[in-house]
Image (spheres, rainbow, N blue to C red):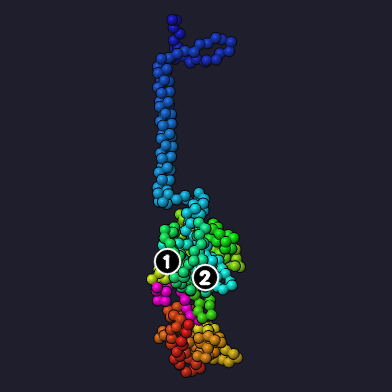
Amino acid sequence: MSELPQQNQNQQQDPVQSGEQYSFYWNYNTQLAHDRAQKEKGSKRGVVIYASVMTAVFAVCFIMLACVILWHQSGGVVSAGSAPAVYVSEAVSPSTVLISASTGLEGSYGTGFFFQTNGYIATNYHVVKNATNISVHLYDGTVKDAELVGYVEIDDIAVLKIEGRNYPAVAFGDSDALTEGEVAIAIGNPGGDDGEWSTTQGIISKCHRVVTVEESKYVADLNMIQMDTPVNPGNSGGPLCNANGEVIGIITRKMTDFEGIGYAIPINKARNTIDAIMEGREDSFTSTVSKVRPKLGILVTDVRKGTQFQVGGRYYTAMQDGVAVSEVYVDSYAHNVILPGDVICGFNGKTVTDKKMLQEYLHDVRLGDTISLKVYRDAELLELKLYLGN
């Protein structure tokens, strides 16, 4: 084999010379350096490829592990992003009932749910109020007569009982752990049997919404869950559920003048009332659903000592800080006891300086109590007794 001529190391070569033939010279040391460089380059590329592959493998394993952990934490339930209404509808509908109540010639529909397997059902009191006959339609088509066990009207909660055992009771969630924006799913019977066992989905709009209900003799502040889940007459008394199929509230009402505003009683507070009904303590327990204050039947404004105010064309001077009575309603508790122009400055031995304070004191008394009021009538300080009859 012939050898290629060796290149003079001190001679500079122009590899391209016009019109002349040329040769490429090979140098052993140069070849070794080139081979080492290529080997190192290949080694670095292999390390990069290996690192990339291993990183991808670890990332996939981490994602799979996280999914498994979340799955177990949720009890194996499909998450809100994976159509939770499908799961909730299948899981909760068999525990939900259609309630038919009649009062003579009139009838009404509502919803309820089993909270015990031996036939105890929770619902709204207004669904069965004054009913002479109550029927419960089960998910399997069975119809049974129901007995009203008890109720707390101001909380709008009632308990029914049907004969039998092994009914599918709901699972309770934790309404104190709710957050705005999470899924809220209703199961119920809007319109009665025409819309039986309907499922609707929305979100929790507000976890703690105070809804004020005013009756003839009292005012009640109800602690509610506000949701935009579509509900209608017939949904009353039905379960409001989270994405896990747990009951977080009892649907009770909706705003008729606005779209997308409905209310449910938080289940943690409702259970306090249900327990009282089951134990026969309806008349003595302290409700956590509602905060009730009797209505005295007066219209008042805040006044300060020494200031003048006008009632019915007459001027009065406030002898002390308090609330000035501008009107007394007929057939109210205050009628013929408190007079327009009176300044209320004391309630059951406590000082009253404004109407907000008076309202707070009224929360501490019950219908049927007798209260004591200190009242300035012109310049005379009086102590009045007021009976808050039922």
Residue 283 is a magenta residue: yes
Q: Residue at x 57, y 65 (%)?
A: 233
* Vertical comparison of 364 with 83: above or below: below
Residue bounds of the magenta highlight: 280-295
Tag shown at residue 38: none
Which residue does the numbered mark 2 point to in the structure image? 133
Count the marks: 2
Disc 2, SS: strand
Of 167 and 279, the residue lying toward us:
167
Q: Earlier in the sequence, mark 1 or mark 2?
A: 2
* Vertical comparison of 1 with 174: above or below: above
- The quadrant holding residue 39 is top left
Residue 271 is a magenta residue: no
Q: What is the three-letter code of the residue carrying label 2?
A: Asn
Q: Is residue 303 visible?
A: no
Find residue 37 and report its horizontal and vertical position in percent. Answer: 42, 23
Q: Is residue 235 visible?
A: yes
Decide whether the magenta segment is chiefly helix, strand or loop: loop
Quarter the N terminus occupies: top left
Q: How many angstroms separate mark 1 from mark 2 (CA)?
A: 25 Å
Seen as rendered, the residue at the extreme bottom is: 380
